[in-house]
Image (cartoon, coloured by chain):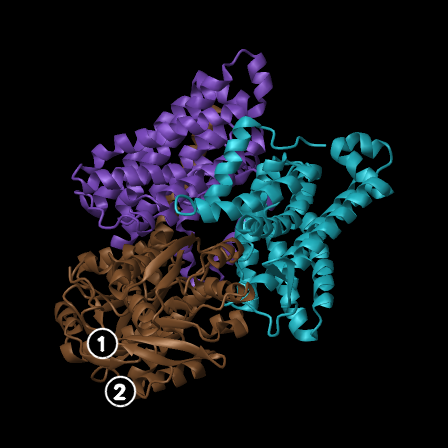
């Protein structure tokens, strides 16, 4: 027995050594692409539970890169996307961020991933002084990782405030029941909504919480029925909101349902069917926009992906265009200059006019979309700079 | 009124749990294995349900096809996963089962797409007022009817047919049953077929209630159903039924009244741990 | 080099984490489906302290202490429920842990804890620290294995009732296993928090618990060297598998199944067979 342990020990050490060597080789082998392209890192969940959003984000980013390259690239040089699957996990995203920065020699990174993964990677980008743009991750601390981190989507709080204005002022509904998704997205939306509710005369009748795994809302809906609110403010993603809205309508409740960018997908309408008619959301993408940037994106996305565009894709597309624009302006490969150029962004992209505040949070209008005849359509725009001001530190 | 409504919502959820947990408890009774991949069969049921309904227009045909297909796949899962591992410690089969579950979630995603599938024209949308002020959709009523029908049908089989009696004998003492001429293998295949078919039916019904089947639809049942059969006393069919309904109702009330302190899963597991500390053998002992 | 260092540090943390579960499940035979809860307890304890200015190495002690304290409570539960009932109870523990963390604002709630300070000694320093932790824990575990406790564990794992007949104080050794195992997980958690520098409830859930159990079983239940190898291998897989992209998790799932189907004794069993063949009979 003892003899065995000894020999096992030596094999074990040997095998660990071989393995470690394997990591080194595999690491240095993967990326040896041509040198005359400008590389942008892109971490995105392509497998696991977040794969649907990841796929859309990737299509959006690839579309952006394609458009930039078709228009002559960055002063003649082509953009190249270096894509890694992070499974929306902080544990996978952190080493990938290091890899993109130290081995792939990217000039900047874009996150097409969820909050946890993006937050973990943001620290590494910020400390390595490589610009990083979060396309749609909502975590409030992402941009606080450092000066080099930006976000092209709304913070949850900002959208929550817009939701309060939409319900209390624009729809004139005062008694509101909240259904809050239990994660950073739902929680920060609820914070913003509650903060502004009083200012718009809203009384919050009740708040119910649910987990991202829930698809069955029978008990909550029964209780809302008893609460008799004037409107329902429900946070969620298309895969939770679709079943929720269809169950709300099936239970005979006809109050307006107000959601957010998480609903923003054709799949929501497919799941909820007729029940989705009249649902309002606050989001970044205006389907009926007359702006050429948005129209091109919507058309280009449908052609490339084979299904209609969504918020996630638009955000990833916007992030790429913001980077491309900053690359053109900064001219050199210098990352500090690139960072400054991103900070000074003043650009119209697929999600509207983009500029950043001192923290790196986006400043833009909130689009209100409504479901009509089985499609998302323009309802109104909220452009109240004071109400929508993201935190600056 | 609200209390009754919540009870009804809880019982409907409990009926779904019961359909899923039955197969798990049958398998545990026969093989002493925690059959996590059962949840993948549940998801498969959902996919077959949507695909066949959208293709043929008949929901009934879809339900029957799903039960049949999932039943056979369940038998195959016994042959491929568990049969070769029967002589090993149960942990080995558990990890193998988890591996198959992870792989099938990914397989569903690769075959049917990450966004999941929905019914183009969801059937059974009509409403019936069962009590003044409380109405349920036909789909929800069908969930209850199916659960009661299938489970009592199985109860009848277990008491009145040769194979049912033989199955119960095998659970109590496999060696003794085998020596009295029971073909233990047949019993196992039959149990996998029935348990999986029920899970398939549950998958179809859940896909209809949500109007969505996603690759990860089985994620919650994969662990919640384990909690249920343990709560019920591991291997006890009656215990699993009681536990399913109890958990459904507790979750319904829990999400409303303690939802701001604990989420749904935590409520379920807090209840489980409390019960096990008092009754370490579960609600109903095996039998 | 930076990338390799990060991957190797991840490996070291996974090895420590798997070794700690190996004490409970491998040595003592108590199946735990909720070991990630203790990784989480260590991570949160260490993260909060280190944000308050406590040096990383000092946070190791409270991180291990907190994890072991809760581990002791679960250990007491293990005296009451057995076998598969215990497995599902521990699964409940991890769901309760994440459920409670989600609602506690001091723990960051759903938002988690970001901005955990970088270890004062840099990336290489963290790797060295992690390796030293692994080494220390490894030596401790080997010592246990060879002591009277190791024998007691074996017999409890084999058959609890027989162990009792042999005069082994079963509750004492079970509690000891939980104490050592959860403290190890707490230490791994402290390292994890400073490696990723962002923690949230989703990082310490059921899935993480399952993947560490898979490391132990694929390594070969109870085998120290097998578990080290499989933990190193499985923790680096997602990084290796970047090449096969879309099929990564599919391959991982099939690998778990295949390993159990064709090498149910794990890496340990494979090595043993290899040695028998090479070294003749023994």
- B259, C133: nearer the viewer: B259
- Of circles 2 and 1, which is in front? 1
Chain B, which colour? cyan
Q: Please state if A294 lies on the left or on the right of B255 as rendered.
A: left
Image colour for chain A is brown
Residue A47: name its quadrant: bottom left
The answer to whether one can see residue A253 in this image is yes
- Image quarter where the C terminus of chain C lies is top right
Image location of residue C35, percent across then percent down = 43, 37
Q: Quadrant of residue B208?
A: bottom right
For the image, the number of numbered tags is: 2
Task: State the mark number for residue A354.
Answer: 1
Label 1: which secondary element: strand
Residue at 74%, 62% (x, y): give it: B64
Q: Position of residue A83 (x, y in %)?
A: 35, 67
**Mark 2, residue position:** A72
Chain of residue at mark 1:
A
At 77% across and 43% down in the image, what residue appears? Answer: B155
């Amino acid at each position: 027995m003892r003899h065995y342990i000894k020999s096992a020990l030596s094999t074990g050490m040997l095998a660990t050594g071989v393995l470690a060597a394997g990591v080194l080789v595999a690491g240095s082998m993967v990326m040896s692409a041509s040198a005359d392209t400008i590389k942008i890192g892109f971490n995105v969940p392509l497998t696991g539970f977040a794969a649907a959003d990841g796929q859309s984000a990737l299509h959006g980013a690839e579309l952006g890169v394609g458009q930039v390259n078709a228009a002559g690239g960055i002063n003649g040089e082509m953009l190249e996307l270096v894509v890694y699957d992070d499974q929306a996990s902080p544990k996978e995203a952190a080493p990938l961020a290091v890899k993109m920065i130290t081995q792939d020699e990217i000039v900047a990174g874009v996150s097409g991933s969820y909050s946890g993964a993006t937050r973990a990677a943001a620290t590494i980008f910020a400390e390595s002084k490589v610009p990083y743009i979060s396309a749609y991750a909502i975590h409030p601390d992402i941009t606080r990782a450092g000066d080099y981190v930006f976000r092209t989507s709304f913070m949850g709080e900002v959208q929550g405030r817009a939701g309060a204005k939409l319900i209390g002022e624009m729809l004139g509904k005062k008694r509101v029941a909240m259904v809050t998704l239990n994660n950073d997205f739902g929680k920060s939306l609820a914070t913003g909504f509650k903060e502004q509710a009083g200012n718009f005369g809203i009384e919050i009748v009740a708040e119910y919480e649910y987990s991202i795994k829930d698809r069955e809302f029978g008990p909550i809906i029964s209780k809302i029925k008893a609460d008799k609110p004037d409107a329902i403010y429900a946070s969620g993603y298309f895969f939770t909101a679709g079943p929720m809205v269809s169950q709300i309508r099936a239970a005979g409740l006809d109050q307006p349902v107000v959601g957010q960018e998480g609903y923003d997908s054709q799949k929501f309408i497919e799941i909820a069917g007729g029940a989705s008619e009249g649902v309002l959301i606050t989001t970044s993408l205006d389907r009926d926009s007359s702006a050429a940037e948005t129209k091109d994106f919507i058309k280009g996305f449908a052609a490339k992906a084979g299904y209609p565009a969504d918020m996630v894709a638009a955000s990833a597309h916007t992030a790429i265009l913001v980077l491309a624009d900053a690359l053109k302006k900064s001219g050199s490969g210098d990352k500090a200059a690139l960072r400054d150029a991103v900070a000074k962004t003043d650009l119209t992209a697929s999600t509207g006019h983009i500029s950043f505040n001192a923290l790196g949070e986006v400043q833009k209008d909130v689009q209100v979309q409504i479901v009509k005849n089985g499609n998302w359509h323009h309802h109104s725009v909220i452009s109240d700079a004071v109400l929508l001001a993201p935190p600056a530190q | 009124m609200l209390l009754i409504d919540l009870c009804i919502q809880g019982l409907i959820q409990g009926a779904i749990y019961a359909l899923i947990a039955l197969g798990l408890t049958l398998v545990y009774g026969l093989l002493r294995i925690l059959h996590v991949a059962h949840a993948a069969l549940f998801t498969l049921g959902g996919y077959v349900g949507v695909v066949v309904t959208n293709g043929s227009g008949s929901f009934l045909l879809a339900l029957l096809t799903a039960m049949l297909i999932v039943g056979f796949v369940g038998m195959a899962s016994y042959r491929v996963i568990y049969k070769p591992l029967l002589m090993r410690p149960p942990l080995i089969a558990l990890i193998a089962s988890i591996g198959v579950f992870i792989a099938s979630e990914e397989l569903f995603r690769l075959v049917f797409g990450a966004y999941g599938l929905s019914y183009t024209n969801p059937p059974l949308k009509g409403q019936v007022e069962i009590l003044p002020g409380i109405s349920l959709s036909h789909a929800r009523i069908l969930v209850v009817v199916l659960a009661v029908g299938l489970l009592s049908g199985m109860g009848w089989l277990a008491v009145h047919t040769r194979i049912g009696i033989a199955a119960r004998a095998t659970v109590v003492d496999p060696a003794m049953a085998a020596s009295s001429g029971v073909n233990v293998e047949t019993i196992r295949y039959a149990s996998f077929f029935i348990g999986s078919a029920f899970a398939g039916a549950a998958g179809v019904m859940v896909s209809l209630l949500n109007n969505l089947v996603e690759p990860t639809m089985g994620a919650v049942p994969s662990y919640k159903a384990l909690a249920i059969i343990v709560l019920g006393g591991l291997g006890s069919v009656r215990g699993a039924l009681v536990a399913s309904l109890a958990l459904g109702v507790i979750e319904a009330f829990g999400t409303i009244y303690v939802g701001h302190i604990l989420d749904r899963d935590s409520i379920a597991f807090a209840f489980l741990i409390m019960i096990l500390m008092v009754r370490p053998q579960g609600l109903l002992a095996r039998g | 080099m930076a990338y390799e260092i990060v991957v190797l540090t991840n490996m070291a943390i996974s090895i420590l984490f798997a070794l700690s579960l190996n004490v409970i499940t491998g040595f003592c035979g108590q199946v735990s489906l909720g070991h990630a809860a203790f990784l989480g307890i260590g991570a949160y304890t260490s993260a909060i302290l280190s944000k308050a200015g406590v040096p990383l190495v000092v946070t190791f002690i409270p991180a291990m202490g907190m994890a072991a304290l809760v581990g002791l409570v679960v250990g007491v539960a293990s005296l009451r429920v057995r076998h598969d009932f215990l497995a599902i109870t521990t699964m409940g523990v991890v769901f309760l842990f994440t459920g409670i963390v989600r609602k506690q604002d001091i723990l960051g709630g759903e938002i988690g804890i970001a901005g955990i300070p970088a270890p004062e000694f840099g990336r290489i320093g963290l790797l060295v620290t992690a390796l030293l932790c692994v080494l220390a824990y490894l030596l401790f575990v080997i010592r246990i294995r060879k002591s009277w406790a190791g024998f007691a564990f074996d017999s409890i794992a084999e058959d609890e009732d027989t162990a009792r007949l042999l005069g082994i104080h079963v509750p004492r050794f079970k509690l000891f296993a939980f104490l050592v195992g959860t403290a190890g997980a707490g230490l791994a958690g402290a390292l994890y928090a400073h490696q990723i520098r962002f923690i949230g409830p989703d990082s310490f859930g059921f899935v993480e618990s399952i993947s560490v159990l898979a490391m132990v079983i694929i390594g070969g239940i109870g085998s120290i060297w097998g578990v080290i190898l499989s933990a190193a291998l499985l923790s680096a897989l997602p990084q290796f598998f970047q090449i096969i992209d879309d099929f990564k998790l599919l391959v991982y799932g099939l690998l778990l199944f295949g390993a159990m189907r064709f090498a149910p004794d794990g890496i340990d069993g494979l090595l043993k067979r290899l040695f028998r063949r090479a070294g003749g009979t023994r």
